[in-house]
Amino acid sequence: MLSTSDTPPSESSQPETISISQQSLYYFMIAVVFAVAGFIVGGITFSARGVSTEDIRSAAAAGAREAVRSELASLQLNTGDSAAPQPTAAPVTVDTSTAPSWGPADAKVTLVEFSDFECPYCGRFNRDTYDLIRQQYGDSIRYVFKHLPLTQIHPNAERASMAAECANEQGKFWEYHSILFKNQADLSAEALIGYAQTVGVADQTKFNECLQTEKYLSKVQADMNEGFNLGIGGTPTFFVNGIALVGAQPFSVFRNAIDNALNTN
């Protein structure tokens, strides 16, 4: 259901630089703590075995670097704000031929979202910005949804994407899309079936069979492969007429990008 408010959420100016969120810093500090703990434990263990202090220091330092590097890689993958690596600034071509969409097929502007139903940043975008885009630009742009479930950190996201495609098969994609983002805490198989009932799919048995047989697994995986080939490193990532826009940005950022594209000859 669309929001009835015409007022965009409060926004603050964002510098065009890479930044680290408080959550990212929190997890980074956890990585450092574990690295230090590893140094201490390693020192005790190797000392008991007669290994020199210099060897202990060298091994522990290498372990600490690896722990920090691993944690940063994890954060880089999942921080949908501005810490995710930016894809190329040059326009790219995204295959939208089989993807769920709304808006005129011949619209001057096409906005493509690569998203993950279990990603908190994707949920924030859907909660704060998506409805405003649809309200303001519903007759002026084509909006396309592509799946990019980050399966290593979101174990339920791929199944949720398949369920959304099963709902799409019965003309209920956008209703189902909305209910998934409102219920990210429970994307179990049982919940996904219940959400189909809630949005009113016409044939519940058909939906259940579609989900159980993983009918759309290959389609979801094709979206994933395309996203990674485009250089996407985090969700949500968007393309406005092929130009990348990364993260759960405020409505003003999307408004500027869309208006600029609409005003381009």
Image (spheres, rainbow, N blue to C red):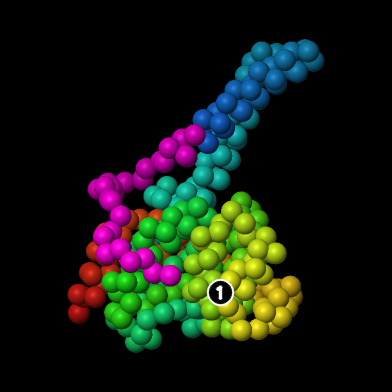
The residue drawn where x is 55% and y is 45% is: 74
**Magenta: predominant secondary structure element?**
loop
* Type of amino acid at the residue the image marks with label 1: Val
Q: What residue is pinned by disc 1?
A: 199
How far from the left and from the top, in percent, is residue 111? 37, 72
Q: Judge left or right: residue 35 versus residue 247.
A: right
Judge whether residue 263 is colored magenta. no
Quarter of the rendering occupied by the N terminus: bottom left
Asked if residue 24 is positioned above or below residue 117 in the image, the reply reads above
What crowding class fits label 1: few (fewer than 14 Cα within 10 Å), some (14-19), or many (20 or more)? Answer: some
Answer yes or no: is residue 224 visible: yes
The residue drawn where x is 67% and y is 79% is: 204
Residues drawn in magenta:
1-26
Q: Judge left or right: residue 134 versus residue 94.
A: left
Q: Nearer the viewer, residue 218 or 48?
A: 218
How far from the left and from the top, in percent, is residue 110? 36, 76
